[in-house]
Image (cartoon, rainbow, N blue to C red):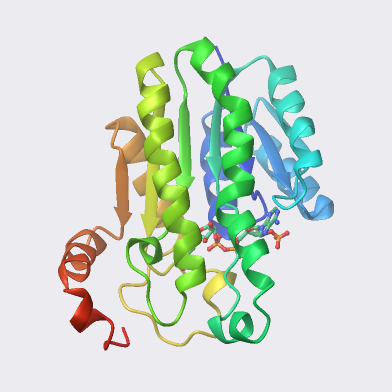
Amino acid sequence: MTDTWIILGASSTIAKAFTRSVAQQGAAVILAGRRMDDLEANAADATARGAAQATPVAFDARRPETFDGVLHAALASGGRLNCAVFVGSMPPQAAIDADPALIDGTIADSFTGPARLLQMLAPHLAEQGSGAVVGVGSVAGDRGRLGNYVYGAAKAGFATYLSGLRNQLGRSGVHVLTVKPGPVDTAMIQGLGKQPFMTTAEAVVADIHTALRKKRNTLYTKRIWWPVMTVIKLIPEPIFKKMSI
Ligand SMILES: NC(=O)c1ccc[n+]([C@@H]2O[C@H](COP(=O)([O-])OP(=O)(O)OC[C@H]3O[C@@H](n4cnc5c(N)ncnc54)[C@H](OP(=O)(O)O)[C@@H]3O)[C@@H](O)[C@H]2O)c1
């Protein structure tokens, strides 16, 4: 049976690299996002690369009324369902300090919007008894840092949600992979200056496919972030609260 990949946040740089990779494998892709012109160009590219089908669908993580359309398009494809979540936004912490209302959208983009859609999809995945969910979190979710703790809190919530979803869907043979990238060279971190252990969208996608093949639960990419975050998580709070990392 052909795989269908629902790609949430399909205009993201990492999502586009992922779409290219699964299109080359002949999968059908449901490209869900806010910018229809970009999604249509993306769909044409996926088709040219070998996608069985490429369907752009309007999706806004802050507008749950758009979620049914994504699900219907996926079910109509007739393929084995899979979902990869790339949605996310990271307003500067200073902007959030000035306008705390920005918290709502930040949490909806990285956590509650995708979680609600995945919850709608879950019974279909459980019924088919196979398939995969790829949820992109961030190393920022591992500890609340001075510079981006609202974004970090959203990613932490999403990671905990994915852990529970894995517990639930794993019993039906569905694989749930949590991805925790460090800095990736995309639009999201433009203007933040030089970042440690930077990687590319293509390298992240190659790591995702390896982790899917090996049925990993959690992927740190680059791999160096696993020992780095293990150490950061061990720093006692009285010391951590004085640090500016
Ligand atoms: N780049 C990094 O250093 C890094 C590190 C760790 C984790 N991540 C995570 O990786 C994922 C992909 O990010 P990226 O690096 O590829 O950056 P990106 O190109 O800026 O992608 C973010 C995507 O999220 C979409 N989005 C934001 N709010 C949305 C909403 N309400 N509804 C629907 N779509 C929405 C954006 O859509 P529009 O195109 O419509 O704006 C954009 O396509 C994100 O979850 C990000 O948090 C990135």
Q: Quadrant of the C terminus?
A: bottom left
Location of residue 55 by image quarter: top right
**As drawn, is 144 to the left or to the right of 154?**
left
Relative side of 102 to 185, left or right: right
Q: Residue furthest right?
A: 37
Q: Is residue 148 above or below residue 45?
A: below
Whether residue 88 is situated above or below residue 80 in the rendered picture: below
Residue sitting nearer the eye, 115 or 33:
115
**Image check: 154 left or right of 49?**
left
Instruction: Answer above or below: position of 75 versus 6.
Output: above
For the point 65% across and 87% down, the residue is 98
Q: What residue appears at the point 39 percent right and 66 percent down from the top-left corner?
A: 140
Task: Give the residue at the far front of this rendering.
Answer: 238
In this view, 192 is above or below 86: below
At horizontal 36% and vertical 34% (from top left) the residue drawn is: 212
Q: Answer with the quadrant where ligand 1 appears in the image.
A: bottom right
How far across and how far down the image is residue 167, in percent? 35, 28
Q: Residue at x 68, y 81 (%)?
A: 99
Q: Position of residue 80 (x, y in %)?
A: 56, 17
Residue 61 appears anywhere in the view = yes
Is residue 12 or residue 107 the one in the foreground?
Answer: 107
List x then y, in percent, for residue 36.
82, 50
Tell me if residue 27 can be seen. Answer: no
Q: Nearer the viewer, residue 122 or 136?
A: 122
Residue 1 in the image: state x and y as whole percent: 54, 11
